[in-house]
Amino acid sequence: QVQLVESGGGSVQAGGSLRLSCAASTYAYNYMGWFRQAPGKEREGVAAISTGGGRIDYTDSVKGRFTISHHHAEHTVYLQMNNLKSEDTAMYYCAASPYGGAELHTNYYTYWGQGSQVTVSS
């Protein structure tokens, strides 16, 4: 069983930064990613990284602002979020997938963190 524990959420003003972290209990997976869900909206993939670090994907709206990274030895994935915008406000979830090619495909992920609220004020 994979367990994911998230931290780093909070409230910031537009233009500010936050860093989310997600500690995994094992490295027996191919992808880790960050997803977000705002009230009344579908859950969307934000960023994903293969555990070997050779493949990274971002949704278009965060390119150039967010950076995902993976520290293999620590079983930890991070999401550095810079120049935050009000539309980034959502519950953010860390996830892990046993499948190669999971990328930003939500239904490929089988393990989920508890969620971290990110609120960006205008």
Image (spheres, rainbow, N blue to C red):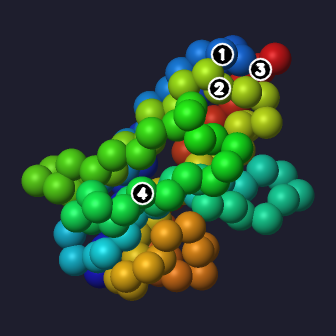
What residue is shown with label 2?
84
Estimate the spatial distance between the alpha carbons at disc 1 and disc 4, rounded to whole Å: 24 Å
Up-down relation of residue 13 to residue 82 (above or below): above
Residue 121, numbered label:
3
SS category of the residue bearing label 4? strand
Q: Which is closer to the viewer, label 3 or label 2? A: 2
| Quarter of the figure that contains the C terminus | top right
The disc at residue 15 is 1
Q: Position of residue 33 (x, y in %)?
A: 46, 60
Q: Amino acid at mark 1?
A: Gly
Question: Marks 2 and 4, how far apart in space?
Answer: 20 Å
Residue kind at label 3, given as amino acid type: Ser
User: Which numbered disc, 2 or 4, marks the residue closer to the eye?
Assistant: 4
Which residue carries the number 4 mark? 56
Q: Helix or strand or loop: what does disc 3 sit on?
A: strand
Residue placed most toward the observer, 60 or 121? 60
